[in-house]
Image (cartoon, grey):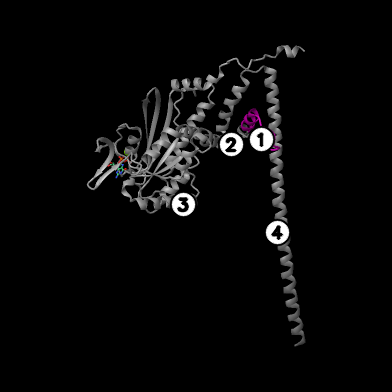
């Protein structure tokens, strides 16, 4: 009876106002501003800077690189842009010296390291007691534009190797650079060849998402156009009575924004207008999540223990600490877990703390016991295998012995007969 009196009834006609939540979100995002980080991977002079300038219609004034660097390097530059009232912090990371070394086997490594370093910085910020994720400058790479040379042949080993090593860490959008260097019919064949090579080598490139029905149609049709064949230029040429961005040649004009000439507009639409938020989201929920999971597992954290029971952070802490005491040198785990334990225990009453500590010790002992049992069982299995091998050898020896005994016996018989 009393319960019924406490129920609040809202009239169907009353306006509550939570329908304005999306607007509140939009306002907050606009105030906060956005950040987007693009990694351009491609050989020196392939047209990376020109394409970025053309994409954002801005002269970012990037210096050209020499072909004589002994190693691949990454160069990051951040710019603040504004379009109407939306602010964008744009970071462009370019490879320097990519494809210039004689031995290109390790060319992808600095790129992998760079991407990981940005994930690591974010993870460290997340693990701090006083986190500042709200105004943290997120430097994680949201998209990698991979520039393919317009050879018309196929992918180079360097391209395959690099993309293969990056595909689990970043959203890759491959582009055919300087597409004005390849004829229309060759381009179609080249695109098909590239896609089949990527598929047969198991390289995962970013697919424009088709789960949101408002953009599903355009995205799925654009997926079929990958890799985009692009032309970059900041030069303006008069075509008809309009000035357009183009590259002028003695035999004609290639218009950057003309869809009959290249896929530049498609790339800009897909990258900036339609899927920028999805690229940011995928970076966080897929690539960063994978990095974070591997890193935490590497540091000894587990969600479930040996008997599929949930493992609490404190147990991991005691486990790693006792390893340290036993001189196994897991220094990294120690500091890492101390951070967690400190966070957890800080606000608890002392008896609760002792209970947790005891519980953790108990769980740790159980784990040590289990691990030792597993080790013992493994030793027993090895011993049994050794015993089996020994018996087999013994049996073979006995057969040989018998055979030689019979042979010498029959020889003696023959001698005696003689
Ligand atoms: P580095 O930063 O030095 O590695 O070079 P980059 O990859 O940034 O190339 P950049 O944009 O500086 O372009 C190198 C040269 O290629 C310039 O002369 C550009 O004008 C030319 N270029 C850029 N884009 C295109 C294109 O789409 N087609 C053609 N034909 N040339 C282009
Ligand atoms: Mg450049």
Q: Return the disc, 4 or 3, that comes first in the chain's sequence.
A: 3
Q: Return the disc, 2 or 3, that comes first in the chain's sequence.
A: 3
Q: CA distance from mark 2 to mark 3?
A: 35 Å
- Direction left: furthest residue: 250
Mark 2 crowd level (few <14, some 14–19, many ≥20, 10 Å Cα): few
Q: Quadrant of the C terminus?
A: bottom right
x and y percent of residue 216 in the render?
Answer: 50, 38
Say which residue label 4 marks. Answer: 389
Q: Secondary structure at mark 4?
A: helix
In front: 337, or 101? 101
Q: Secondary structure at mark 2?
A: helix
Of the numbered discs in the image, which one, if any, rests on residue 304?
1
User: Position of 178 compared to 127: left or right?
Assistant: left
Residue depth check, mark 1 versus mark 4: number of the one nearer the observer: 1
User: Position of 390 compared to 13: left or right?
Assistant: right
Q: Secondary structure at mark 3?
A: helix
Say which residue label 2 marks. Answer: 297
Q: CA distance from mark 2 to mark 1?
A: 11 Å
x and y percent of residue 79 in the render?
Answer: 36, 28
Say which residue label 3 marks. Answer: 196
Residue range highlighted in magenta = 305-322
Q: Is residue 306 magenta?
A: yes
- Check mark 2 vs ligand 1: CB closer than 8 Å? yes or no: no
Q: Return the disc, 2 or 1, that comes first in the chain's sequence.
A: 2
- Direction bottom: furthest residue: 418
């Amino acid at each position: 009876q009393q319960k019924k009196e406490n129920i609040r009834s809202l009239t169907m006609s009353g306006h509550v106002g939570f329908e304005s939540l999306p607007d509140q979100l939009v306002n907050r995002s606009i105030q906060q501003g956005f950040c987007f980080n693009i990694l351009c991977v491609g050989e020196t002079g392939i047209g990376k800077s020109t394409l970025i300038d053309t994409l954002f219609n801005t002269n970012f004034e990037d210096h050209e690189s020499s072909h004589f660097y002994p190693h691949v390097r990454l160069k990051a530059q951040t710019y603040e842009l504004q379009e109407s009232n939306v602010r964008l912090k744009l970071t462009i990371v370019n490879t320097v010296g990519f494809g210039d070394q004689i031995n290109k086997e390790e060319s992808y490594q600095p790129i992998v390291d760079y991407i990981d370093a940005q994930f690591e910085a974010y993870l460290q910020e997340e693990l701090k007691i006083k986190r500042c994720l709200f105004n943290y400058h997120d430097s994680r790479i949201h998209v990698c534009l991979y520039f393919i040379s317009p050879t018309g042949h196929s992918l180079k080993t360097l391209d395959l190797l690099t993309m293969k090593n990056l595909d689990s860490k970043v959203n890759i959008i491959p582009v055919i650079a300087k597409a004005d260097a390849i004829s229309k019919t060759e381009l179609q064949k080249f695109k098909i060849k590239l896609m089949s090579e990527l598929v047969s080598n198991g390289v995962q490139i970013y697919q424009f998402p088709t789960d949101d029905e408002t953009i599903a149609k355009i995205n799925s049709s654009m997926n079929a156009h990958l890799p985009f064949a692009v032309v970059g230029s900041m030069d303006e040429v008069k075509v008809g009575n309009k000035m357009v961005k183009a590259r002028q040649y003695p035999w004609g004009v290639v218009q950057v924004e003309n869809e009959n000439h290249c896929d530049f507009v498609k790339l800009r639409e897909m990258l900036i207008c339609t899927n920028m938020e999805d690229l940011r989201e995928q970076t966080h929920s897929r690539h960063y999540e994978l990095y974070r999971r591997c890193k935490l597992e590497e540091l000894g954290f587990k969600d479930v223990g040996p008997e599929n029971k949930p493992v609490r952070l404190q147990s991991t802490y005691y486990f790693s600490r006792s390893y340290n005491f036993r001189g196994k040198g897991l220094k990294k785990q120690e500091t890492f877990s101390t951070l967690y334990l400190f966070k957890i225990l800080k606000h608890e009453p002392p008896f609760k703390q002792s209970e947790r500590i005891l519980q953790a010790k108990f769980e740790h002992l159980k784990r040590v016991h289990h691990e030792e049992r597993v080790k013992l069982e493994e030793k027993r299995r090895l011993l049994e295998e050794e015993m089996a091998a020994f018996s087999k050898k013994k049996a073979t020896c006995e057969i040989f012995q018998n055979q030689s005994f019979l042979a010498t016996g029959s020889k003696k018989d023959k001698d005696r007969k003689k």
